Amino acid sequence: MSLLLGVNIDHVATLRQARYAGMLDSPNAEPSPLLAAEDARVGGADSITIHVRGDRRHMQVRDAFEIREKMELPLNFEMGNTAEMVAMALKLRPDFVCLVPETREEVTTEGGLDVDGLYGSLQGTVAQLQQAGIKVSLFIDPDACQVEASARIGAEMIELHTGCFANAFGEDRVVETNRLKTAAELGHRHALQVNAGHGINLQNLPALLTVPHLSELNIGHTLIARSVRVGLVTAVREMRAAMEGYQL
Ligand code: PXP
């Protein structure tokens, strides 16, 4: 099967909130995350990712339900492990949930989820979501103990955090690529679906495509940034084309 592309459209909501956070019912409130999801689909996205954060800085609850109701693609719902978000996911019924760490101060999701350390508090959430028919992914750093803990807890998927990889250059990039390779091999041995995300762009993609066993890449920032110049349909198409031929 070819490598799938999940498009994260949170930044479309970030832009809308910058002007209309207090006037979301206004007919002027734009851009629309739903229309962005449609553009991503036309460009070749395989799924749409959104993250409703505790502080609601970009996606709002109503965005999530509108996208779920009107969009054709599978929905990947990123969320922190809180009672509020579990309740919301159980109502929203996305195809997948990706559990991520969340703190109010961070600019974006900065590190992986400590599945090993938080095992007790995550176990119930994973089971509850799975019982509702939602597949669970865990956003983790590419470390053996986190991969092992993700397998032990019974998640279907892991998403390897590629932030360190993306921000490393030269020899450091080689080291980070090797970390991803080792973690992907281990995840595959445990029969986990291995995804990757964070900071991926057209420049670092070729190195990432040397990592084996990848099923899906989740990409947001660079696609929305590029869409300012060429539109989201073209930006997604370019990324899709660059992912072609992945065979590991
Ligand atoms: N995957 C996860 C779990 C994330 O939290 C994010 C950032 O919201 C992404 C992928 C996408 O990262 P980026 O916007 O850097 O492409």
Image (spheres, helix red, strand yellow):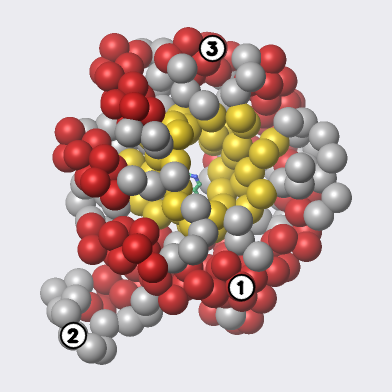
Residue 159, x across and y down, in percent: 54, 34
Does the CB distance between marks 1 and 2 fall below 8 Å?
no
- Taking the image as shown, residue 136 lies to the left or right of residue 158, namely left
Q: In the rendered view, would you say 171 is above or below 78? A: above
Determine whether the residue tagged by mark 1 lies in a helix, strand or loop.
helix
Q: Foreground: 21 or 137?
A: 137
Q: Which corner quadrant of the image does residue 31 belong to? A: bottom left
Residue hosting label 3:
148
Give the foreground label among 1 and 3. Answer: 1
Q: What label sits on residue 26 in the rendered view?
A: 2
Q: What label sits on residue 194 in the rendered view?
A: none
Q: Residues within 10 Å of mark 2 (few under 14, many from 20)?
A: few
Residue 65, x across and y down, in percent: 28, 60
C-alpha distance separating marks 1 and 3:
37 Å
- Taking the image as shown, residue 210 lies to the left or right of residue 21, namely right
**Earlier sequence position, callout 1 versus callout 3:** 1
Task: Determine if the C-beta at disc 1 is less than 8 A from ligand 1.
Answer: no
Q: What label sits on residue 42 in the rendered view?
A: 1
Quadrant holding the N terminus: top right
- Please tell me which residue is depicted at 38% across the width and 28% down the height of the picture: 130
| Amino acid at dot 1 | Val
